[in-house]
Image (cartoon, rainbow, N blue to C red):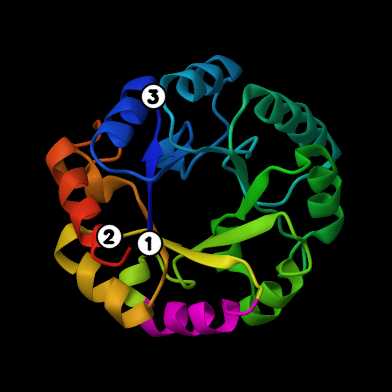
Amino acid sequence: MILEVIATSVLDAKLAQKHGADRIELISGIAEGGVTPSAGLIEQVVKAVDIPVNVMLRPHANSFRYDEDDLAVMLRDARRIRESGAAGIVMGMLDGKGGVDTAALELLLGETGELAVTFHRAFDELEDRRAALELLSRYPTIRRILTSGGRPSALDARDEIAELVRLSEGGAPDILAGSGLVLASLDEFIRHTRVREVHMGTGVRVNGRALEPIDPLKLQAAAAIAGKYK
């Protein structure tokens, strides 16, 4: 079981490592769903912690559709992330037909190299997530898919996520369940879905607010729950 926690600052990252997170997703613009953090923040976080740091690659929060200018920005950012020593990149891109933009995906995978890639919650906007899972499994460096099962909260998509977990067995990317997970229901959610990785943001923050720092006691409690399944 892997507990991934959102960090938006060096302090967040240090708190995440100290209080039980297994991995960090580093982002800026948490209230917008996450965008690419600055090069300085990436470098300082990677230096500050020993646990893996996966960095969001998203040039804006307008949509998950990217034009040539967006992709040029993303290629430069991907290079900087790769050179920073980060463990992975978190990205996702859609075409205008409700599917994965494979041309953009393959272009960026050419720059991310051997870094582990998480296809993020753009996945939840796809018309056919099962077909997308099969498609994404063709790319060896795509190690996981961050998803709430197509709902605003993963807690409302337990059966969907359980099915995706089942379908991912045998070589497909792992399912990383996130969005809306809270301490009170985390144990039951893990047991029901059999998910092997969970992603928490506001659920482990002070007052449950996106713009507050990580709450050490909440994170410790989440880590204790996740630890039962390791």
Q: Position of residue 15 (x, y in %)?
A: 27, 30
Quadrant holding the C terminus: bottom left
162 displayed left or right of 132: left
Q: Which mark is residue 147?
A: none
Q: Are marks 3 and 1 in contact (CB under 8 Å)?
A: no
Which of the 4 quarters of the picture holds residue 23? top left
Q: Are marks 1 and 2 in contact (CB under 8 Å)?
A: yes
- Which element type, helix, strand or loop, lies under badge 2? helix
- The question of residue 230 being in magenta is answered with no
Give the main secondary structure, helix, strand or loop, of the magenta stretch: helix
User: What residue is pinned by disc 2?
Assistant: 226
Q: Which residue occupies 17% across, 36% down?
A: 216
Q: Are marks 3 and 2 in contact (CB under 8 Å)?
A: no
- The question of residue 162 being in magenta is answered with yes
User: What residue is pinned by disc 1?
Assistant: 1
Q: Position of residue 194 (x, y in %)?
A: 38, 77
Give the mark, 3 or 2, whose residue is nearer the N terminus.
Answer: 3
Residues drawn in magenta: 157-170
Residue 211 in view in this figure: no
Q: Position of residue 28 (x, y in %)?
A: 47, 31
User: What residue is pinned by disc 3?
Assistant: 9
